[in-house]
Image (cartoon, rainbow, N blue to C red):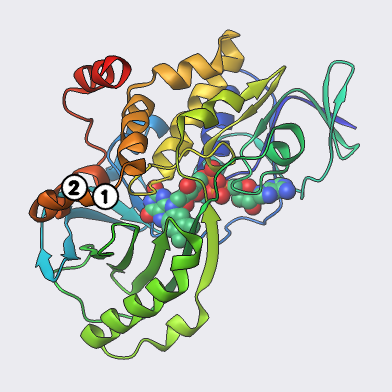
Amino acid sequence: METFDAIVVGGGPAGSNCARTLVRSGMRVAVLDAARFPRVKLCAGWVSPPVWEQIGLSPGDYPHGIWEWKRMHVHFAGKTRSPGCRGWLIRRVEFDDFLLRRSGAEVVEHRVQKIERGQDGFVIDGRYRARFVVGAGGTNCPVARTLFPRKERKPVATQEREFEARTPFIGGDGEPEILLHDDLGGYSWSIPKSSWTNVGCGTVDPKALLPAWSQARRFFEEEKGPIPALDAVKGHSYYLFRSDHLRDCARDGVYLAGDALGLAHPLTGEGILPAVTSGRLCAEAILGGSDYRKLLESHPMFRDYRILAAVSAAPKKPLRFLTPLIPRLFAMAFSARPLPARRAIEWWQNHG
Ligand SMILES: Cc1cc2nc3c(=O)[nH]c(=O)nc-3n(C[C@H](O)[C@H](O)[C@H](O)COP(=O)(O)OP(=O)(O)OC[C@H]3O[C@@H](n4cnc5c(N)ncnc54)[C@H](O)[C@@H]3O)c2cc1C
């Protein structure tokens, strides 16, 4: 039996940022991951500006492929608009491996199955023991599955493929094309990263995915010609943020972070930023003995998410008058710009 101060299950962005914060304060930390890194994680690879602050790194010091994202081309309601945007594009296979190595934790390739409460903490699969366990194993995290209640709503569905082939695209390298679905129930993308291209599609309603994917594929192929690599897309699902997910974020020495908790941006599905933010807050709660749920609930970004989750649940028809503005609003959301007048909106939500 190997004993650690903390065990983090899952070495994605949530797990590695949590592990890094714990290690830096002197804890002995193991990250158990079922996969051997570098591993493929389905993801378009866009990273908004606050991510760098959360991981304590400047984009210029990131040693792998990186593309600055200044403009996007949004196809919506029969028109194409090209609003400005702020962010970066990376390749997840490189980014996650880099973050995990940099965490300084002991990384063990191990698929976690059984988590038991022991006398003084937890025992994992009869082999690893720790006072604290962090579940950062993504959508199907074994810690969330075995120790926390099921989420009430269904996750969003996605399909994607990143392939090595330069296809023609509008604009320059690192300028994503987004096909925003007319019902605002999802979007598809084609993202050029020099010799790599990432094409995918996501819908809030899982049943809408396949028809939306066919439509998106037709759209991109009409523009770029046949893309045979898209015959081999892969699917994945994950949960968008809801305020009630924060209720079940921790109990007695066990914590959840990132997709395991269901924290992705309620409109865009951005998941790396909430993953690294919750990973760090989780470590701070462990180190300071503080209330993790309060840290999450009072964080400005999650307060914005709470408002946006309410907006996304509202009927979409009244928003039609915003049609010309939607691409720009979408670009702002992609850039993780803080909501203007958040306090006033919160007041209105609580008293209005
Ligand atoms: C198609 C698609 C495109 C996306 N595009 C973007 C984007 O461009 N930008 C963005 O910000 N977000 C994007 N997201 C969301 C983002 O990828 C996730 O929200 C983010 O990866 C969450 O990070 P995480 O650390 O919580 O989980 P993950 O990155 O999923 O990491 C979880 C880790 O846990 C490990 N694990 C799972 N089960 C076990 C087990 N039993 N034992 C041990 N280890 C286990 C896995 O191997 C994995 O390494 C996208 C998602 C999808 C599906």
Q: Is residue 24 in sight in this rendering?
A: no
Residue at point 28%, 19% (across, down): 346
Mark 1 closeness class: few <14, some 14–19, many ≥20 residues within 10 Å = few
Residue 221: numbered disc? none
**Which sits in the foreground, 73 or 149?**
149
Q: Relative to residue 291, is residue 321 depicted above or below?
A: below
The image quadrant of residue 130 is: top right
Residue at point 8%, 55% (across, down): 324
Q: Quadrant of the N terminus?
A: top right
Q: Position of residue 340 (x, y in %)?
A: 16, 27
Q: Is mark 2 within 8 Å of ligand 1?
A: no
Q: Position of residue 335 (x, y in %)?
A: 23, 43
Number of labels in the image equals: 2
Q: Is residue 308 in sight in this rendering?
A: yes
**Which sits in the foreground, 350 or 140?**
350
52 left or right, relative to 4: left
Q: Relative to residue 320, is residue 224 depicted above or below?
A: below
167 left or right, relative to 113: left
**Which sits in the foreground, 159 or 5?**
159
Q: Quadrant of the C terminus?
A: top left
Residue at point 54%, 32% (across, down): 245
Residue bearing the label numbered 2: 319
- Residue farthest to the top, as pictured: 289
Q: Check disc 2 and give the amino acid type.
A: Leu
Q: Do the residues under discs 2 and 1 have CB atoms within 8 angstroms?
A: yes
Q: Relative to residue 29, is residue 177 depicted above or below?
A: below
Q: Check disc 1 and report its element: helix, strand or loop.
A: loop
Q: Check disc 2 and report its element: helix, strand or loop.
A: helix
Residue bearing the label numbered 1: 316
Q: Check disc 1 and give the amino acid type.
A: Lys
